[in-house]
Amino acid sequence: MATLKSWWNYLEQVFAYASFCIQQPIQAPVCQPFWRWTMIASLALGGLVALVLLWKLISYQLKLAAARKAQAERERVDHDAIAQARWDGDNAFSGELTAEEIERRVREAVNDKRLADARNNDRMNIV
C-alpha cells in the first residue's frame, strides 16, 4: 500500500509540475526540462506513427504486386489446354449416326480417357 501511495504522490507532483509549466511561458528556466521531454516524446510518437504508416504502405505495395502477378498469370491463356478440355460431345450425336455408331464412339472416348488417366497416374507414381 505504501508503494502505491508513493507512486500516487509522484504522479500528483508530475501533474502539478505539468500544469504549472503549461501556464508559464516556454522560456521559463524551471520548465525547460518539461518542454524538452514533451518535444522528445512528441517527436518519438510522430516517428513511430510514420514508421507504422511506412510499414503499412510497403506491405500494401508487396501485396498489390503479388496480386497483379497472380492476375497476369490467370489471364495468360493456354490455348492447347483449352482445346484439349473443350467439349466436343455434340459432334458425336449428329442425326446421321446410328445407335450402334454412337455407342461405339462413346465407348472409344471412355476407353481413351481411361488410358490417358492411367498414363498420367503412372507418370505421377514414377516421379
Image: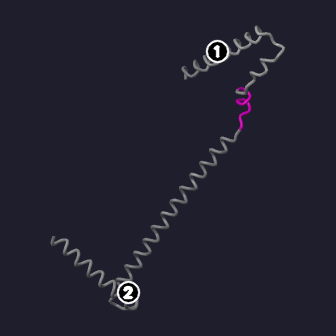
Label 1 sits on residue: 115
Q: Is residue 49 left or right of residue 75?
A: left
What SS does tag 2 mark?
Answer: helix
Label whose residue precedes the other's in the sequence (2 or 1): 2
- Image quarter of the N terminus: bottom left
| Residue 83 counted in the magenta span | yes
**Residue shown at the point (72%, 26%) measured from the top left:** 84
Q: Which mark is residue 22?
A: 2
Please give the range of residues in magenta: 77-84
**Residue shown at the point (71%, 12%) measured from the top left:** 108
Please tell me which residue lies in front, 102 or 41: 102
| Residue 24 counted in the magenta span | no
Q: Count residues near mark 1 (Cα–Cα under 10 Å), then give few for <14, some for 14-19, many for 20+.
A: few
Overall secondary structure of the magenta section: helix
**Residue shown at the point (51%, 64%) measured from the top left:** 53
Name which residue type carries label 1.
Leu
